[in-house]
Amino acid sequence: MPKPSVPIIEAILFDVNGTLRIRESHEPTQQVAFSRMLGLLEKENASDIDWEELTRRQRAYGDWAQENLIQLSEAEIWSRWILPDYPHEKIEPIAAELTLAWSERKGRTIPNVGAEETLVELKRRGYRLGIISNTMSTLDIPCSLDTFGWNEYFEVVVLSSALKCRKPAPEPFWEAARALNVETAHCAYLGNRISRDVVGCKRAGFALGMIIEPFGNPRADEQSQTIAPDVVINSLNELLDIFPSEIDMFQYPK
């Protein structure tokens, strides 16, 4: 793939779910997650919980949060949306673990193909790397970074669960650039959804909004978007064809 004509890029920031990692079915992980939820909620059997209703409520919250670009705290999500009849004083101390187990009930997370080697090489080439991700959980993504051994690659991790604001609002992108002390005009962002990732980073003034679209897995939100990505890649290692070995303005086409 030829390198696009772009300004000097100093920082490359990433979405996580569907971009740097994927979640796959994994029965042992899922069994542990369900057992953990039962224990946290002081239930003895899976049948004691209406899982379909909890899922419906969680999705209703997700729709509301995305529409308003607001991320509530884990305690607020569970006490106001998912388990409104459960005592708030019991929810608050277990909310973070409950949210993590809720995520893991779908399976385990694994690195996307090519993620490790791409991050290592971009870091070696001198790029500042970071994460900007929408997530209900304060623990989920940090746990993955620990498990994958990726903490050393990222100088900044901006999570909606901490910032209380969701992409495509520009604030998460501004916060990441501020933490890196890099102008947004010298930042690039890679995600997997135009509506959140490209729209958000462009609102924030990022130089490049990029989308990863694996072969055979087209973007779900492409048709309704009026903003096009600057770059579309099919695999993470294509980033190494776009960003040069040295950050030097004279390496970029005029």
Image (spheres, rainbow, N blue to C red):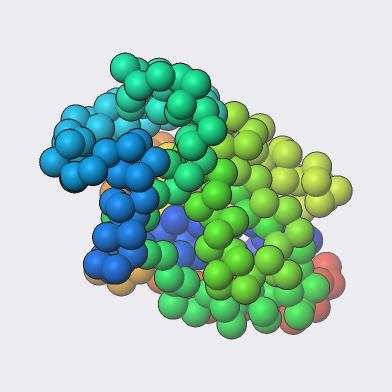
Closer to us: 48 or 188:
48
Closer to us: 95 or 177:
95
- Residue 204: image location, x then y, percent: 66, 37
> Which residue is drawn at the image coordinates 53% and 63% (left, top)?
144
Closer to us: 249 or 190:
190
Query: Left or right of 216: which side holds 142?
Result: right
| Residue 7 image-quadrant placement | bottom right
Closer to us: 187 or 137:
137
The answer to whether residue 150 is visible is yes
| Residue 148 image-quadrant placement | bottom right
User: Does residue 131 lie above or below 153 as drawn?
Assistant: above
Query: Left or right of 251: which side holds 194?
Result: left
> Which residue is drawn at the image coordinates 86% and 48% (left, top)?
181
The answer to whether residue 167 is visible is no
> Which residue is drawn at the image coordinates 34% and 54% (left, top)?
33
Q: Quadrant of the C terminus?
A: bottom right
- Residue 252: image location, x then y, percent: 74, 70
Q: Residue furthest left?
A: 47
Query: Left or right of 136: which side holds 12?
Result: right
User: Does residue 69 lie above or below 98 as drawn?
Assistant: above
- Residue 11: image location, x then y, percent: 74, 59
Query: Left or right of 9: which side holds 116?
Result: left
Tag count in the figure? 0
> Which residue is drawn at the image coordinates 63% and 70% (left, top)?
150
User: Does residue 147 lie above or below 184 as drawn?
Assistant: below
